[in-house]
Amino acid sequence: MDIVITILVFFSIIIIHELGHFVAARIFRMNVDEFTIGMGPRLFKFQGKKTLYSFRLLPIGGAVQLGEDFESDDPDSFRNKPVWQRMIVIVAGAFMNLILGLIVCIVSVSIGEKIATTQVSLFYENSVSSEKLMQGDEIVEINDMPIWTTMDISYCFQNTAAKAGENEQRVYFDMDVIRNGQRISLDDVPFALNTSEDRTAGIIIDFAVQPEDKTVGTVLSSAFRTALTEGRLIWITLFDLITGTYGINDLSGPVGVVTTMSNAYNLMSVDEFLILVAFITINIGIMNLLPIPALDGARFIFLLIEAIRRKPIPAEKEGLVHFIGFALLMLLMIIVTFNDISRLFTGGA
C-alpha cells in the first residue's frame, strides 16, 4: 500500500505539471493535439473536440502535445500564437509545480504540532556548541549561507560532516547570530562528530530550537521560507553535481524517487512526508526550467530569442535540437533507472 500511495503521489505531481501546460494553452485558445496520462502502451483513448485524450499503462508520467516543432496554417496552432502567450504556456507546468510545492508546505506546517524556529532554546547534556552559542541566539548564517529554516541548519551540518576526515572528533562553523537584538559573528563554533560503524560521520546536534505558536501569519511565513529553502537546496545540489561533488551514481529517477518516498512514508510523520513531497514537486518544477534541450527551459530560451530578434527560429531546426536533447535525456534516464534498480537489489536504496 505504501508503494501504491507513493506512486499515486508522484503521478499526481507529474499530472499537475502537464495540466499547467494544458490549461494555459486552452486559456489562449491554443490547439492541444493530445493530452496523455501515463507512459507506455496505450490502454484507451477518446477524441475530444480538438484534443485526443489517452491513458497509458505506466503511471509515471504524462505529456501535452502542442505541435511546438511543426509549422501550420491553423491560426490556433502553437507557433502562430503571440510569443508572450507561448512563453506563458511553456512555463505554466513548472509554475504549477512550484505553486503545488508551496501549498503542500502550508498543509505540512498547518498539521504539525509546532513551528520550528532557528533560535536556540536549550542545550543538551555534554554540549560542546555551548562554548560559543548561547541560549536565545537566533542563527541567521552558517559558513556564509543565510539560514531561513532548520532545514538549512541540517543541510550545513550534513554537508560538512560528509567531508570530515575519519579521525576528526569535532568540526567547526562560522556563524552569525542575533543576540540581544544585535547581529554578532561567532568564529569556530564547535560540534562533536559521531562516526557510525560504516564510518559515516554525522554531527551531534547538541541543542534544541525554540518552537513557535501557529497563527495564520506564522504558518504562511514558515511555509514560504520552507519552499524557498527547498528551491535553494536544489540549486546548491545542481552546483555540487556540476562541480563533481556528486556523480551520476548519486542521481535518482522515477524508481529511486518512488522508493525513497515509500521508505519515508513508513518512517516519517505525515507533516514530514509532505515536506518531502513538496521538495520533489519543487524539484520537478526547477529542473524543467533548466535550459536543457527538450525541457521547458530550453523552449523558453528559444522563445526569448524569437522575441528579441522578432523572427522565429525555423521549426525543423529547433525540433532537431530538442530531439537530440530528448535522446540524451532518455539515455541518462536509462542509466539512472538501472542504478536505481541495482540499489534495490543491493540494499543501497
Image: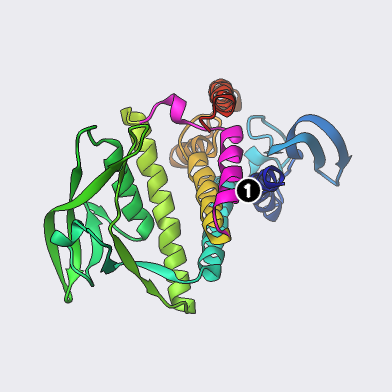
Q: Is residue 267 magenta?
A: yes
Q: Quadrant of residue 101?
A: bottom right
Q: The residue under label 1 is which amino acid type?
A: Ile
Q: Secondary structure at mark 1?
A: helix
Of 98 and 152, the residue lying toward us: 152
- Residue 349 belongs to magenta span: no
Judging depth in this view, the residue of 325 and 7 nearest the camera is 7
Who's the residue at 37% across and 32% down the image? 198
Q: Position of residue 129 (x, y in %)?
A: 19, 57
Residue 286 or residue 269, whichever sits in front: 269
Task: Specify the color scheme.
Answer: rainbow
Residue 85 shows up from this direction:
no
Where in the figure is residue 311, as x and y percent of width and height?
51, 35
Q: Is residue 42 left or right of residue 277?
A: right
x and y, in percent, of residue 29 in the image: 71, 51
Tell me which segment is drawn in magenta: 246-269
**Residue located at (54% from left, 21% from top):** 335
- Give x and y (percent) for residue 67: 68, 34
Q: Which residue is mark 1?
A: 13
Question: Number of marks in the image?
Answer: 1
Quadrant in the picture for residue 59: top right
Helix, strand or loop: magenta stretch: helix
Q: Is residue 202 left or right of residue 7?
A: left
- Give left or right: position of 2 versus 239: right
Q: Is residue 117 visible?
A: yes
**Is disc 1 surrounded by few (<14), some (14 to 19) or many (20+) residues within 10 Å?**
many
Quadrant in the picture for residue 253: top right
